[in-house]
Image (spheres, grey):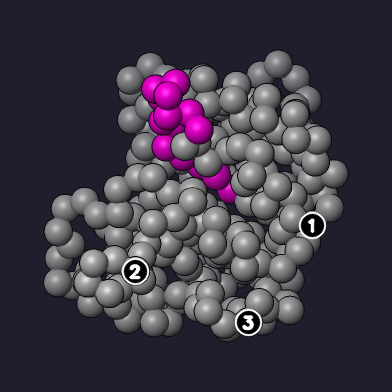
Amino acid sequence: MDPKGRPSRATEGFFGRRRGKTIRPQQAAALESGLGTYGLDLSAAQPADLRKLFKADVSAVRLEIGFGGGEHLLHRATGAPGTGFIGVEPFVNGMAKLMKAVNEKPLANLRVHDDDATRLLDWLPQASLDGIDLLYPDPWPKKKHWKRRFVGPSNLDRFAKVLKSGGKFRFASDIDSYVNWTLLNCRAHGAFAWQAQDAADWHRPYEGWPGTRYEAKAIREGRRPAYLTFIRK
């Protein structure tokens, strides 16, 4: 508990900011109502079938961790109404932006979690996800902070638990040290096989990739993004 008696939000896997600029009243209203509609209640019993979490009839479920402003998540969820998407974003401003968008154009195949992704991963049933996307996560560039990177043995254990056999873990970053870090950690873990057909494959965007504002900024600044795909063995 914090000094005012509220539940502590200190978490194992989230070290970034939770707030940026003050959100507008319209965004605040959309955030409150949107979380009431789309937010997951992790105090509830672990679901036996994730597909039942959605209002839509879905045949697969995918997770996106750290969706930022939600551009990619909205693109994927809109384009694949038969797939359920769970988006995680602790940053209030990003969640508010997404909730405003779905307030205007509702999505029956979307659910969200506004706290640390490790809590959600621990709540999800074993072999329940068809895919996990971790796109442009905080790189924590200083070596003393590398232990804060989301990709590591503990979270790869979590990924391995919740992904179905053959499920995909997709990782995108413009930071070379984090790309190498992810390749080495996934190889050392043993539950994931890197899918690369040729030397240029990891610089080729995913099929149907809409791009993101962050990615465009990285390219303008001369950083070349990498797109890795790992298959759960």
User: Could you tell me which quadrant the C terminus lies in?
Assistant: top right
Relative height, residue 196 to residue 85 (above, below): above
The type of residue carrying mark 3 is: Ala
Q: Position of residue 1 (x, y in %)?
A: 34, 69
Which tag, 2 or 3, sits closer to the chain's start?
2
The type of residue carrying mark 1 is: Lys
Query: How much space separates mark 1 and mark 2, taking CA atoms?
Result: 36 Å
- Which element type, helix, strand or loop, lies under badge 2? loop
Instruction: Compare residues 137 and 123 and report the one nearer the observer.
Output: 123
Which tag, 1 or 2, sits closer to the chain's start?
2
Location of mark 2 (residue): 1
The type of residue carrying mark 2 is: Met
Q: Which mark is residue 164?
A: 1
Query: How much space separates mark 2 and mark 3, taking CA atoms?
Result: 23 Å
Residue 16 visible, this orientation:
yes
* Left or right of residue 214: residue 82: right
In front: mark 3 or mark 1? Answer: 3
Which tag, 3 or 1, sits closer to the chain's start?
3
Tell me the residue at 38%/50% (across/down).
68
Location of mark 3 (residue): 45
Residue 206 found in image quarter: top right
Q: Position of residue 60 (x, y in %)?
A: 71, 66
Instruction: Compare residues 199 and 188 and report the one nearer the observer.
Output: 188
Q: Residues within 10 Å of mark 3 (few under 14, many from 20)?
A: few
User: In the rendered structure, which segment of residues is drawn in magenta?
Assistant: 133-147
Residue 74 visible, this orientation:
no
Q: Residues within 10 Å of mark 1 (few under 14, many from 20)?
A: some
Q: Position of residue 94 (x, y in %)?
A: 33, 56
Instruction: Compare residues 172 and 1 and report the one nearer the observer.
Output: 1
Q: Is residue 146 magenta?
A: yes
